[in-house]
Image (cartoon, rainbow, N blue to C red):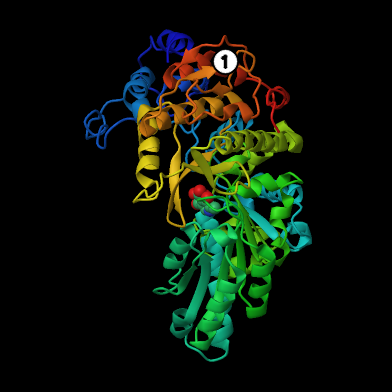
Amino acid sequence: MDSRSDAIISDNMVNKAPMSPFNVEEFRQSAHQMVEFLADYYRDIESYPVRSQVEPGYLYKQIPDTAPESPETLDEVFSDVKSKILPGITHWLSPQFHAYYPASFSTAGYLGEMLCGGLNVNGFSWIASPAATELEVIVVEWLGKLLNLPKEFLSSGGGGGIIEGTACEAVFVCILAARKRFVDKYTAEGLLEGEVHSKLVAYTSDQTHSCVAKACKMAGVQGDNLRILPTDASTDFALSPAVLLQAIENDIAAGFIPFFVCGTVGTTSSSAVDPLHAIGDLAKSFGMWFHIDAAYAGSACICPEFRPFLDGVEKADSFCLNPHKWLLINFDSSCLWVKDPKALESALSTDPEYLKNKHSDEKNVIDFRNLQLPLSRRFRAVKLWMVMRMYGASGLRTHIRNGVRMAKHFESLVKANRHFEIVTPRNFALVCFRVKPQANDPDNGKTINQKLMDTINANGTVFFTHTVMGGVYTLRMAIGATMTQPIHVTDTWAIITTEANRLLGLDSEMCFNSDSGAEMCSSSDNESVDSDCESTPVLNLSDSEEQPLGAGALAAAMRPLVALSASNSFQERTECIAVA
Ligand code: PLP
């Protein structure tokens, strides 16, 4: 990173006087420098290895083990950021980041983050910053309406929403609310509180995010009173209502009290979707709290074509999605809607003298501190507000659809190649795939797939991760990073197939079709892993000359195109995707 930001930094830093705690002109100048630094970073992001290549402890050797006694200058800090911090960064915003679920990010999201940090308000109660509270009510309502949530979840319908920091916090507060509801009920019937605690059981599937297990642990759901129910390929790794019913009946027969069930829309491993209607019916029959975790895939449901995945949400007590995963909002932002906000308040509220004020006492305002774990809270609503205003619902839908289209294309490339297979069906923008194991492979393809992933990730050109589905070692291609363009997807496929060819001992080369640009074709060797690619759809992205290229060269050749395309508008980006 150099050029403009370096020039500005050195011009501005002739004065080496220590920075004051706050001075308007100094702030203006320094903040400009930071923006220049970040703009250069985003411009050059593809020049960094996507996954950091450092070894554990690398930074301890480079940074002093005590804080400086005397002030240092901003340019000294910038210099260390470049030489010491950036090498240890895994570049979540890179267009070639396809690991986990990508981090969401956008210009409007970042501007919102600046405003949030710049105003630095702590809106724990209405009086502490009325705009922070009221804007949060408004934007969570906006998003709830975009999702077509039942009115019972909206504040206008008696429910309510809040922006928590993470889905982990969201499920934790719901478990605390459910536990309180049950403890109140059973202690009123004469049981001791400890007795009730020891009998409470919660249910999830083995595909549910570990946030539920952690929340149960913290809430004192004792021992193995969290029933982690098995799933398999017969339900595409969704929770089976029959398995859930059986577990509930066994528990009731053994004297336990079922109190909480979590269904997921878009599981972390494979983006499986649990049957919400059936789970909701069981929750209702047995009086359990039903939470839906749609941390990743919930965002997609602002598109009418994905909304059916939420059918049954009307039977839930609480519903959570993370706009910071896929809705162009910078981390952190996790929206939680509940039908009964008083249940959260009942579990979480306190009333210390030093926070008392007229409006809270009169109960004519919302004090969000009573619906979350910490007291303090950031003005996260302003990020959501800016993103929703500056992209509009149509822009957000286009962003989701672009990710899904690219994932569909990647899926079609995998399917068209006889050496690869899809492991579980794709619902959103995550593709679960693997190199097919050879007959009689003793570890069912684990070694070759692990090697394929490790080698590519170590090279730094792209970054993707794995999971295990029903004992099958599975590669995950999670598409949806904001800067990812179709070209990156075809580029990644080239890298994967080149490496797979090498590992399988197949002789091949990648090449461009002269008329399709980024599409790949195999060499004349029919055994290469890309041998079937002529049957795949074409992404019409560039008019490169036909030439043999290895994967590394391929990636390098793509970079200038990427830098240009990253600035495209939604419309231009949509148009450049020639596959549906
Ligand atoms: N739920 C699901 C389905 C997830 O995929 C994840 C993270 O990827 C989480 C919950 C945890 O989210 P958070 O980090 O916001 O707690």
Residue 159: in sight, yes or no? no
**Residue at 74% from the left image edge and 57% from the top image edge:** 154
**Mark 1 neighbour density, 10 Å: few (under 14) some (14–19) many (20 or more):** some
- The residue closer to the viewer here, 462 or 423, is 423
Q: Which residue is mark 1?
A: 561
Residue 262 percent across, percent down from the top left = 57, 64
**Total number of numbered discs in the rendering:** 1
Secondary structure found at label 1: helix
- The residue closer to the viewer here, 311 or 391, is 311
In the figure, 580 relative to 190: above or below? above
* Res 249 quadrant in image: bottom right
Q: Is residue 506 left or right of residue 172?
A: left
- The residue closer to the viewer here, 249 or 182, is 249
Going by the numbered disc 1, the residue's amino acid type is: Leu
- The residue closer to the viewer here, 103 or 132, is 103
Q: Is residue 189 left or right of residue 137?
A: left
Residue 78 percent across, percent down from the top left = 38, 21
- In which quadrant of the rendered image does the C terminus lie? top right
Q: Is residue 174 left or right of residue 210?
A: right
Residue 133: in sight, yes or no? yes
**Residue at 57% from the left image edge and 69% from the top image edge:** 261
In the figure, 213 relative to 119: above or below? below
